Amino acid sequence: MRNLIMTVSYDGTNYFGFQAQPGGNTIQDRIEKAIWHLTGENITITSSGRTDAGVHARAQIFNFHTASSIPLERWAFALNSRLPPDIRILEARMADPEFHARRWAKRKTYRYTIDNNRTPDVFQRHLQYHHPTPLDVEAMRHALQTLIGEHDFTSFCSVGSTKLSHVRTIFDAVIERHSNTEFAASPGLIHITVTGSGFLQHMVRIIVGTLLQVGEGKRNAADMEAVLKAKDRSRAGPTAMSHGLMLWEVVY
Amino acid sequence: MRNLIMTVSYDGTNYFGFQAQPGGNTIQDRIEKAIWHLTGENITITSSGRTDAGVHARAQIFNFHTASSIPLERWAFALNSRLPPDIRILEARMADPEFHARRWAKRKTYRYTIDNNRTPDVFQRHLQYHHPTPLDVEAMRHALQTLIGEHDFTSFCSVGSTKLSHVRTIFDAVIERHSNTEFAASPGLIHITVTGSGFLQHMVRIIVGTLLQVGEGKRNAADMEAVLKAKDRSRAGPTAMSHGLMLWEVVY
């Protein structure tokens, strides 16, 4: 048995998230079905972590054990020809026999994109949350800095979480405004990029939903620390829409 | 009656092109329906020219005469709220009473995008033609230069064309390779940008289909001149797929 590690990119628009579900319309279901078509093996893959319905991945990681003798360099092409066009395997590598895509993950990066132009970019509408009114990015940056470090993120976690501990570490959190010169006028795009040891359910989306309130002036940037310390989901803002979120990178 | 000129951006993926058709699923049909919902007027809009099924527009131009008293600055928002999310009015302006979006157009620019990465970018798959094997961009550039100037473009025109003259002028034609560092590895994207006085049916797509044969080494770059001079559609390459093409700009 070989332990294979694969990098997969997916447009989450048409899926109920990564994790397998009885209905079957998830990224994991599609990949496992493609492996079954290719090798005849009924395999359960292990990802670095689930992504919610509608959330995208630039580079999600998963691993699985296979008895198949298909050469390593053939896997990506062979699986892609059995996958829908919105899921693409980018790379396949051999992993340590003990490698586990979730347990071995050291840090993850997510990126949330806000289209802050008056009229949304039609071509990127599935990938960007459209917010046409002005946002105070400086205030949002100030609020975002508060979250860096090791904290109990209960305030930024879905009340449905089953995790025993809500303590996570955010290593880096950056907000940047980009003018999108090709397709639209200023004020362009806003990217919020957060790197952490791991993320709780809806964590990045609740952070973004709270930052949007700060950017709109409905909440002070300094309020972020009180929200964090409250360890109370009801103190934070709403969960931002899923389609602006992308799992950017997983580092091992 | 005011003569209004509007700039519209559309993702052509789900439409049978720009021009109105009995079936109704075209960009023009959707815009005219939105105007009818807004003003009650049964108006026929005039575009700078049709785009084929699946072709996109960054900035298509159309005009129409209306008796509506809706303030100019309200039109874009009012129409967008009555249009599907893959069609967005970017701007509305007052036009000269004689302005005609097709007849007054001085030059048009189209851009065709080739995703030359081994694995396609899932997020841009509706906007880029995926060609995973190497392309000789230098040879393609050499061939493309041949077309600049005033020529009879019969070889690069659909045999179904009803135009009396196939003489058009290409002012500028550029091919550029861009590394797409965010989502994929080299060799990146190839953009082919062509500006001309006007374009015949399928003209840009036949040019690109012929350039692809040059890039693949199936045809010499120097062959392009003989193809042009033959004034024979069968001498050129195939019509490249529509989804890589975008109407970029119309200048008046």
Image (spheres, coloured by chain):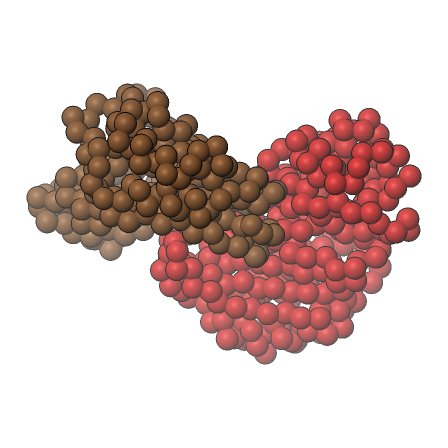
Chain colours: A brown, B red
- Relative to B137, does residue B54 appear above or below in the rendering? above
Judge by depth and name the residue closer to the eye, A239 or A212: A212
In the displayed structure, does residue A252 sit left or right of residue B2? left
Q: Furthest residue to the bottom?
A: B222
Q: Position of residue B241 (x, y in %)?
A: 57, 52
Q: Position of residue A168 (x, y in %)?
A: 21, 37
Q: Position of residue B37 (x, y in %)?
A: 75, 26
Residue A155 in view here: yes
The quarter in which the N terminus of chain B is drawn is top right
Number of marks present in the image shown: 0
Report the residue at 65% width, 76% height from top. B146
Judge by depth and name the residue closer to the eye, B188 or A124: A124
Residue A34 occupies which quadrant of the picture?
Answer: top left
Judge by depth and name the residue closer to the eye, A41 or A174: A174
Residue A79 in view here: no
In the displayed structure, does residue B90 sit left or right of residue B240? right
Q: Position of residue A108 (x, y in %)?
A: 26, 45
- Relative to B171, does residue B73 appear above or below in the rendering? above
Report the residue at 26% width, 31% height from top. A229
- Relative to B223, does residue B239 appear above or below in the rendering? above
Report the residue at 49% width, 36% height from top. A217
The quarter in which the C terminus of chain B is drawn is bottom right
Residue B88 occupies which quadrant of the picture?
Answer: top right
In the displayed structure, does residue A214 sit left or right of residue A59? right
